[in-house]
Amino acid sequence: MSGPRDPRTYDLDALREDLLQHDDGQVNDSIPELAEADPDLCAIALALADGTVRASTQADVPFSVQSAVKPFLFALALCDTGGDALDRIGIEPTGEAFDAIKLESGTGRPPNPMVNAGALLTASLVDGDTAADRDERILRGLSAFAGKPLEVDEDVAHNEHLLGDRNHALAHLMRAEGTLQASADDAVAVYARACAVLVDARTLAVMGATLACGGVNPLTGERVVPREVARDVVSVMATCGVYDGSGRWMRRVGVPAKSSVSGAIVLSAPGVLGAAVISPPLDEQGTSVRGALAAERMSADLDLHVFGRASHH
Ligand code: GLN
């Protein structure tokens, strides 16, 4: 058997061509902007720990980050609360859909920061007296993870807020339980804006690499979050990042990751690299079909499975 391939020369466009042979899955239609996504958009990028970024064709096409923002919101909430966020939110996988109307029994806390209830709460815990202050803090924090200024797609933010009935329901439920301090409407608005931040595969890979590199952006050298925060976030990505598909993901791919309804997946292979794949058609769990295939292939080819790495490392 041949050894692992080198990420510096790995042929991302050949992988992309293979992925385009698959056309299973459904594009999310919760808001018009997502429903109109090109089902044949497909891009892959790698950001290595030494700061090298490698990208396929279409890796500069923008899309809204959606749930792939959740690990970064958790990171910012952990920073800004000095770790207290860990008392206010669970870290157990749910085995349920990302938007399940359900809180941890007994405590009324969100089950984990990777499902919508949890992300609504983490977005409300970042520093800021008003919703606008929290929007600003989140955009600044996400930009530091990316190593460049990011922007919000205002139409996506507006429609997510307007049409996100389940998110409004979750926010009200957390208010009723006393676990959400912000107003329900502010919590949904801030979370919706965070989901509407525009990235591309290249940018999202760098964000994943910043977590994989213990909180230091490998391009800018900036320490974005403390090392223990990055470790906590990547741990929860490993156990909860792909919702009710997290167990299968860990066996098949073995790299902590976060999926999203735009068809993006961000991956953080600790100490090695960050990666991102975008392809809008989703499986039943809301995970990009081509994204999962790409992740599985890259994990095998580049020897990234955290529990299956060969002895030459
Ligand atoms: N903005 C979407 C929502 O709140 C994000 C969900 C996702 O990407 N899984 O429903």
Image: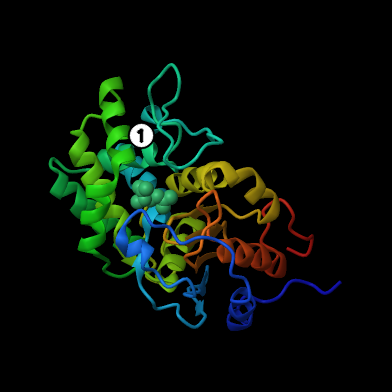
Front residue of this view, candidates 139 and 271: 139
- Looking at the picture, which amino acid does disc 1 mark? Ala
Above or below, comparing residue 211 to residue 247 in the picture: below
Above or below, comparing residue 95 to residue 64 in the picture: above
- Assess disc 1: are there few (<14), some (14-19) or many (≥20) residues with their C-alpha within 10 Å of its C-alpha: many
Q: At which x and y percent is residue 218?
A: 45, 68
Q: Which residue is mark 1?
A: 85
Q: Quadrant of residue 164?
A: top left
Above or below, comparing residue 162 to residue 109 in the picture: below
Above or below, comparing residue 159 to residue 49 in the picture: above
Q: At which x and y percent is residue 226?
A: 40, 49
Q: Quadrant of the N terminus?
A: bottom right
Q: Is residue 187 left or right of residue 12?
A: left
Q: At which x and y percent is residue 60?
A: 40, 78
Check the image and name the residue furthest to the top: 106
Q: Find numbered disc 1 in the image and state the secondary structure of the residue it sits on.
A: helix
The answer to whether residue 272 is visible is no
Say how many tags the image has: 1
The answer to whether residue 297 is visible is yes
Q: Residue at x 39, y 71 (%)?
A: 200
Q: Is residue 60 left or right of residue 163?
A: right
Q: Residue at x 65, y 53 (%)?
A: 254
Q: Quadrant of the C terminus?
A: bottom right
Q: Quadrant of residue 35?
A: bottom left
Front residue of this view, candidates 34 and 179: 34
| Coloration mode | rainbow
Q: Residue at x 47, y 67 (%)?
A: 205
